[in-house]
Amino acid sequence: MIVYAIAFVFYVVDLANRSGDAHLAAAVPAAGNAQAGAQGGTATLVKASRAGAPTKLPRSRWLRAGFALTVLGFLLHLAATVLRGIAAGRVPWANMYEFALTATLAAVGIFLIVQFFVDLRFLGTLVTGMTIMFLGIAKINYYVAIVPLVPALDSYWLVIHIIVAVLAVGFFTLSFGLSILQLLQARRGAKVKAGDTKSMAFMVSYPNQVRLEDLAYRLAIIGFAFWTFTLIAGSIWAEAAWSRYWGWDVKEVWTFIIWVLYAGFIHARATRGWRGTRSAWLNIVSYAAVIFNFSVVNVFFKGLHAYSGL
């Protein structure tokens, strides 16, 4: 958590610098235009960016340092998770504390892997911030001593079911972060149209609203595929453990609700033409259901899936 916290600070400093650099990038052309007007238009000007295009700002050493610390934090996080499993003599997925440890590990791991395909390091503030928050909550509220698996969990389906579930949550988390930035870009665009070019200036260096929406949609589709398999694997496991595929247990119901929400988000955007803020909000509501399922359903609702360990 300490390493993640330091990485978070570096990402925040980079965010602050983006705002200052954006103001500078906007001020230099303006100053040049004024000078050109005073000298009859002969001054050499800094080339302004196209309308609506993100300003190209220098890559920040703070961002690089934050990302390097995120990699280090992930390796330490992975070691802690593996050691918990070794100490327990089983996979570390028997209670809320171990679920939180593994889910946050998956979110950070997917964040790192995605960088090989598209640069999403600008999500570092959100990813490390959420990881710190959930690890802190898990340590304070969910920590329990190592205990053996309950009979219903003692199955190879535990490995399959949980792995695909945490992978789905990892992709959903990145998609959620992109939708948040999409809303911020939309808000900034509205302010710029109103004549306020200084508000939320740091967003000028981020991808535009359309690009953010496209990335959020693509990651949500990947997460949805994993979540679909989570639902199927859970049903097969339920038949093996309780001799029925579906029993309307509260955890089963909420897993299905999440599936329906993301299916609705993907369907609405693909076939109904939902774009912009409506699409972003539907994605955010879907992710809120994921968090509710983990933090509320697992703790306060009792049923066959009451494995919180609390």
Image: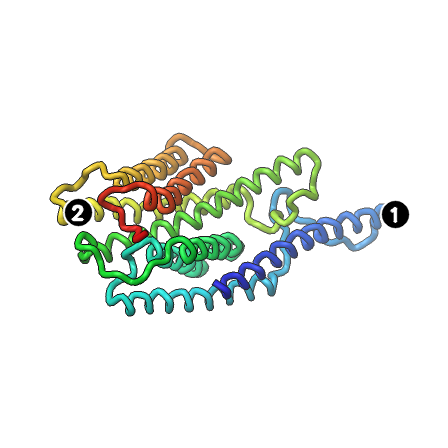
Amino acid type for the residue under numbered disc 1: Ala
Q: Nearer the viewer, residue 271 or 288?
A: 288
Name the residue tied to disc 1: 38
Query: Which badge, 2 or 1, is on the more N-terminal residue?
Result: 1
At horizontal 64% and vertical 45% (from top left) the residue drawn is: 200
- In the displayed structure, would residue 195 be above or below residue 69? above
At horizontal 43% and vertical 39% (from top left) the residue drawn is: 283
Residue 41 placement (x, y as % from top left)? 83, 48
Name the residue tied to disc 2: 236
Image side of residue 4 versus residue 150, left or right = right
Residue 109 placement (x, y as % from top left)? 40, 60
Furthest toward the left, the residue is: 243
SS type, badge 2: helix
SS type, badge 1: helix
Which image quadrant is residue 290 in? top left
Q: Nearer the viewer, mark 2 or mark 1?
A: 2
Q: Nearer the viewer, residue 239 or 303?
A: 303
Label 1 crowd (10 A; few <14 / some 14-19 / many >=20): few
